[in-house]
Amino acid sequence: MRLFSIYDSKVAAHMTLFCQQHAGQAVRSFQEGANNPETMLNKHPADFTLFELAEIDQETGEVTPHSKAVNLGTAAAFVKPTAQQMPMFPPQLKAAEA
């Protein structure tokens, strides 16, 4: 099991701690939050970064911190553009018409 955090740059602190078996699961959860308009992650995506902090032995409960927190990306990197943000025509079509 691994320990993750969501760092809030406006507060300058690791605010949300959570565990997942794999980094991909943590990224998926973070991405879901980044794309949910009801969350702070979505409203201020440049402010939040996902980090992997440690590994946890599930048998002994021993926590082994990484020598340095592993940056897995900002919420801004995971936000999918909405229909309103997408261009009407892809750039390659505009170039071909010119």
Image (cartoon, helix red, strand yellow):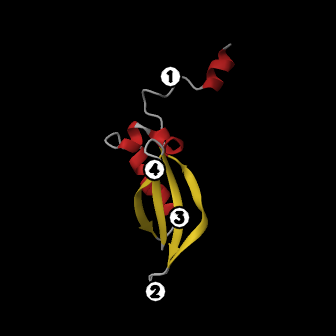
Task: Tell me where residue 69 appears, x and y as whole percent.
Answer: 57, 60
What's the distance in space between the residues labelled 4 and 3, CA to CA? 18 Å
Residue 20's image quarter?
bottom left
Residue at x-position 47% and y-position 47%: 12
In the rendered structure, which disc, 2 or 1, sits on the residue that comes first in sequence? 2
Q: Mark 3 points at which residue?
A: 53
- Could you tell me residue 75's position as x and y percent? 48, 45
Q: What residue type is labelled 3?
A: Leu
- Are discs 4 and 3 less than 8 Å apart at CB? no
Sooner in the amino-acid sequence: mark 4 or mark 2: 4
Residue type at mark 2 is Thr
Q: Which residue lies furthest to the front in this view?
A: 12
Which comes before the other along the chain, label 4 or label 3? 4
The alpha-carbon separation of the residues under discs 4 and 1 comes to 25 Å
Question: SS for tag 2?
Answer: loop
Q: Which amino acid does label 4 sit on?
A: Gln
Disc 2: which residue: 60
Residue designated by label 1: 88
